[in-house]
Amino acid sequence: MPTIVQKFGGTSVADSAKILAAARKAIRAQKDGNRVVMVVSAMGKNTDLLIGLAREITEEPPAREMDMLLSTGEQVSVALMAMAVDSLGHEAISLTGAQIGIVTDSTHTKARIRSISTERMQKALDEGKIVIAAGFQGVDEAKNITTLGRGGSDTTAVALAAVLAAGACEIHTDVDGVYTTDPRVVPEARRVGRISYDEMLELASAGAGVMHSRSIEFAKKFSVPIHVRSSFSDNPGTMITAEPESHDQPVCGAAMVKNEARVTVLNVPDRPGAAMTVFSRIAAKHVAMDMIVQNIAEDGIADISFTVPRDDLPTTLGAVEEAVRQLGAGGYSYDEDESKISVVGLGMATQPGVAQRMFRALAAKGINILLITTSEIKISVLVAREHAQEALRTVHEAFALDREPPAALVAAEPAAEAPKAEAAVDMAARLEGMEDLIIGGVSLDQSQARVTVVGVPDTPGLAAEIFEQIAADGIVVDMIVQSVGREGHANLSFTIPQENLDKSLHLAAELSKRLGCQTPTSCPEVAKLSVSGIGMRSHTGVARRMFQSLADAGINVDMISTSEVRVNVVVDGAQGPRALAVLQKELEELIV
Ligand code: ADP
Ligand code: ASP
Ligand code: MG
């Protein structure tokens, strides 16, 4: 008999009527011939209320006690859910994370799953019971209660689906699927029939709150198809699988992180290891940096900009001050009222003009771009927070995301994509260190060249203009990095195929002359090194190790871009093979 995991989020169990409705859904799935595991979140805004209570007592509650407190939210809802199933005449058993045997590491408030035992769940399922599992929680080796981070019930659900080799993992929530962007912010957003793991991962980390990003890492790693759907209707929902909705469309969705703060360390001496000093000081304070932009240095100095969640700004500035002193850098600047807008799509890697379309649309609304970073399948820009909502709406419209793409693949029935139940032996082996970091490999691309436009006036529309001309010539731009404007000027670097260098440089030179900028610089052969993997962002430290090992080998990093599944660095072409060897050696034990 197939197993199905059904997860119900907070709003879907906010009151007794909703709990009963969810129980009926599970009973229906059981009647349809499934063994049913429900994963349930805390009711409504309960987790927020508990956090508020803790804050009334102390500004800095001990993390262990925070987990003890927050886990009660889910314990309430599983008990009520089991009562609901029982009242409807069916058998159920509620289980906490500890009772299931979800073992995590000891990182309180953002613990990672190490292993899950299936015996107790299997036994209850064999007895015909509906198993009701508390989401978001586990226990460490010493039996301390842990939680997986906000939104973590999604991760519990996908992890249970993986260990039980379930045919389907349904995420029941208050929207009827994954939309092209948050439908609460942009009402024109369209529900997508399907979306690929990689796209969903990038969207989730770019701010699409509909799925916990670690749940998608899991789903990808264990090939669990996810079906996101409404708790309140039987609408078809969205399938998250390996396949995208369409192979032709450049962009599948847009997202926003509203509260970002930007810090720029000025006049950093351009020598190996300088960036490392900044990053390691910040990492030591457990602050996760988001957009990291180090632009090409002029006259031996570079600026390093990055964003952090606004709440982490005070801690970050403390670390930055230390780094500035140590490096003898020229000081720093910051702004705490900025937002990040991103577009994501597998198709952008092969189509020219995607960046240009985004930049042009923003320029047309007079919205200035403060930073740009790109990865293979994502373009992110930083804008002033007052423009965030309009910017999101604008890019959504620019890519016609409200319309179904041509040649959209129809979402397949979840059952048709179910992974084959694995032999017990394989499964057990796979479940060791479930959330461990996996590095797929390090690759070297020596086919690109770099152009830097120096001293671009920092006004709306200039990035658009540059990339419009390049795209008009059919040139596919790979990495783009725009540093923050200094005294009203910014530097804009990008990489292109080597055979397009002359043309691109010519276009850049003409434009520079017209704009009164300095002569553009270029490098005819750069080496781009990419480290790809799963869990690279949530396991902080991969980027740090990369930069450290390159610095130790005396290799200078020219450009950096990071995404959920990749860290890219650009170094001088002649250093490529050596940089590859350095990184392979450094990351050896993590590569599978
Ligand atoms: P749950 O409590 O069920 O886990 P969440 O609040 O975590 O629900 O996630 C659902 C919410 O995510 C929606 O109400 C919606 O506002 C928001 N959201 C953000 N981005 C998207 C998107 N791209 N598609 C759908 N919903 C989104
Ligand atoms: N209750 C937890 C939270 O609000 C976990 C979840 O809902 O996924 O973050
Ligand atoms: Mg959620």
Image (spheres, grey):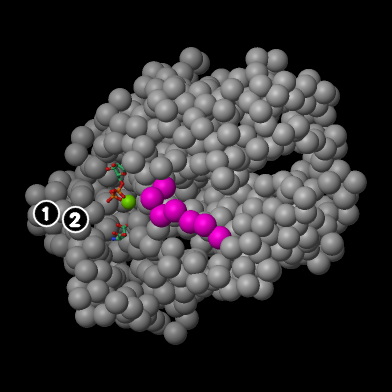
Please tell me which residue is depicted at 84% across the width and 63% down the height of the picture.
553
Image coordinates of residue 449 in percent, x first then y, are 80, 34
Locate residue 236 relative to residue 214 in the image: left or right: left
Locate residue 444 relative to residue 327 in the image: left or right: right
Locate residue 392 relative to residue 27 in the image: left or right: right
> Is residue 125 visible from the viewing direction of this image?
no
Residue type indicated by callout 2? Gly
Image coordinates of residue 201 in percent, x first then y, are 50, 45
Image coordinates of residue 207 in percent, x first then y, are 41, 46
Task: Give the position of the C terminus as an image quadrant.
Answer: bottom right
Image mark for residue 500: none
Ranked by sequence position, the earlier of labels 2 and 1 is: 1
Q: For numbered disc 1, what is the local secondary structure?
A: loop
Cβ–Cβ under 8 Å for marks 2 and 1:
yes
Q: Please, is residue 263 above or below residue 170 in the view?
A: below
Image coordinates of residue 561 in percent, x first then y, are 64, 47
Please tell me which residue is depicted at 16% across the width and 53% down the height of the picture.
14
Please tell me which residue is depicted at 80% across the width and 26% down the height of the picture.
501
Name the residue that disc number 2 marks: 44
Residue 144 or 337: which is nearer the viewer? 337
Residue type indicated by callout 1? Asp
Q: Quadrant of residue 301?
A: bottom right
> Is residue 298 visible from the viewing direction of this image?
yes
Q: For numbered disc 2, what is the local secondary structure?
A: loop
Say how many tags the image has.
2
Residue 537 or 36: which is nearer the viewer? 537
- SS assignment for the magenta stretch, majority: strand
Name the residue that disc number 1 marks: 15
Q: Please, is residue 353 above or below residue 94 in the view?
A: above
